[in-house]
Image (cartoon, rainbow, N blue to C red):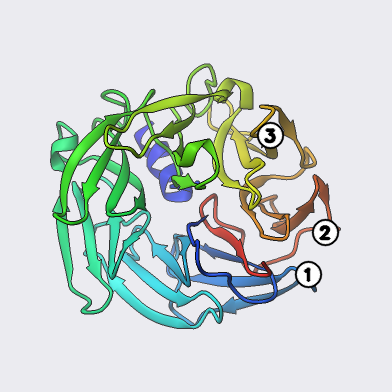
């Protein structure tokens, strides 16, 4: 179990888009990163007006073998996990290289949140958060060892709301079995200390947290994954961001109702739907499936959208209403585009490598 969960978290540690003031380029574009789990990685861009993919943008050597990605305002951050151990920064409009910051040998960074000139990067299974000042390049660490009895909480996502940084972590033993429910540490960025912690409804927060100011009261959403193949527990949870934060499962978004586990999710620009890439594996972690599903936020209805033969493993919503997905089907992988629940593409648009499993696809611009 430890080996599988470690791989799964490195593969799918929910790309997020947290920008609010930045409108992006005039033409809507989707950006995907992927790697070969060795030394090679790449970034590709899909122009949603022409449906043409430009492969290997962003510059050589900037994307390593196990990348995930998040856009925050006018910057795109590629988090190079495992042996990469760095965060690479790109201009969101041009996708030109801006900077790169190391997080330390063996840190295995998982996500990035931004407060002012500082980045907060949760590290996996090492008991620290890396704080990076983007002006000076200085890197310091925030101690999170107290979150887990073994001193090494398995932290996989971070999201900033004002001067608070919410960091989602599992507390797993040496066999990667949960010691208890997942936990969110709330970092006070004015002091760089853990101000409080919030217990999640089940074990194993999984993938990127996300938030839309006009959806679920501005609460943070985080998928929970007690089991990869038993869907009787787990859910998409909502975490309040007030002075006394609480966490609870969203009614209608249990893993049972979804008939699988959330690989990645994104909220439509108009706030009406939550789009999810939902996956399954059997008891031997074989025969995987991946389906694009929509959740009507007002009505609570879940609908399967993609063709059952597709292997949907990531999703990003666009300002023009388009929904872009990564299809990881062996020998036929690439990006697909949906509009109003109907696929616009006639086949997968190749990006140069098999798409990364979750957290590696964003869409913005054209708004």
Q: Residue furthest right?
A: 346
The earlier-in-sequence mark between 2 and 1 is: 1
Q: What crowding class fits label 3: few (fewer than 14 Cα within 10 Å), some (14-19), or many (20 or more)?
A: some
The alpha-carbon separation of the residues under discs 3 and 2 comes to 23 Å
* Label drawn at residue 360: none
At numbered mark 1, what does the secondary structure look like: helix, strand or loop? loop
Task: Assess whether mark 2 and mark 3 are in contact (beta carbons under 8 angstroms).
Answer: no
At 66% from the left and 58% from the top, the residue drawn is 318
Side of 260 relative to 345 (left or right): left
The earlier-in-sequence mark between 3 and 2 is: 3
The alpha-carbon separation of the residues under discs 2 and 1 comes to 8 Å
Side of 97 relative to 269 (left or right): left
Quadrant where the C terminus sits is bottom right
| Residue wearing tag 2 | 345
The alpha-carbon separation of the residues under discs 3 and 1 comes to 27 Å
Numbered disc in front, either 3 or 1: 3
Is 7 drawn above or below residue 100 in the view shown? above
| Residue wearing tag 3 | 296
| Residue 259 seen in the current view | no
Q: Position of residue 2 (x, y in %)?
A: 35, 35
| Residue wearing tag 1 | 51
Task: Assess whether mark 1 and mark 2 are in contact (beta carbons under 8 angstroms).
Answer: yes
Picture quadrant where residue 67 is located: bottom left
């Amino acid at each position: 179990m430890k080996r599988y969960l470690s791989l799964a978290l490195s593969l799918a540690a929910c790309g997020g888009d947290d920008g609010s003031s930045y409108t992006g380029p005039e033409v809507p574009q989707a950006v995907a990163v992927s790697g070969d789990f060795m030394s090679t990685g790449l970034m590709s861009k899909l122009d949603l007006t022409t449906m043409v993919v430009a492969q290997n943008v962003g510059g050589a050597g900037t994307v390593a073998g196990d990348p995930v990605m998040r856009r925050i305002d006018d910057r795109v951050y590629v988090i190079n996990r495992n042996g990469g151990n760095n965060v690479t920064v790109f201009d969101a409009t041009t996708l030109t290289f801006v900077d790169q910051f190391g997080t330390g040998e063996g840190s295995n960074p998982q996500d990035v949140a931004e407060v002012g000139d500082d980045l907060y990067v949760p590290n996996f299974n090492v008991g620290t958060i890396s704080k990076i000042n983007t002006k000076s390049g200085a890197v310091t660490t925030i101690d999170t060892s107290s979150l887990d009895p073994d001193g090494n909480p398995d932290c996989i996502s971070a999201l900033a709301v004002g001067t608070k940084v919410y960091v989602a972590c599992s507390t797993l033993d040496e066999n990667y079995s949960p010691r208890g429910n997942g936990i969110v540490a709330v970092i006070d960025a004015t002091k760089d200390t853990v101000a409080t912690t919030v217990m999640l409804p089940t074990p194993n927060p999984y993938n990127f947290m996300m938030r839309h100011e006009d959806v679920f009261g501005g609460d943070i959403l985080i998928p929970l994954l007690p089991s990869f193949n038993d869907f009787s527990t787990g859910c998409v949870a909502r975490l309040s961001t007030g002075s006394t934060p609480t966490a609870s499962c969203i009614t209608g978004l249990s893993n049972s109702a979804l008939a699988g586990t959330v690989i990645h999710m994104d909220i439509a620009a108009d706030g009406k739907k939550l789009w999810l890439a939902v996956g399954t594996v059997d008891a031997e972690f074989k025969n995987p499936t991946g389906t694009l599903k929509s959740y009507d936020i007002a009505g609570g209805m879940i609908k399967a959208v993609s063709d059952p033969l597709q292997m949907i493993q990531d999703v990003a919503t666009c300002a023009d209403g388009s929904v872009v997905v990564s299809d990881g089907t062996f020998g036929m992988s690439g990006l697909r585009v949906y509009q109003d629940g109907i696929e616009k593409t006639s086949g997968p648009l190749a990006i140069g490598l098999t798409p990364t499993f979750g957290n590696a696809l964003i869409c913005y611009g054209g708004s």
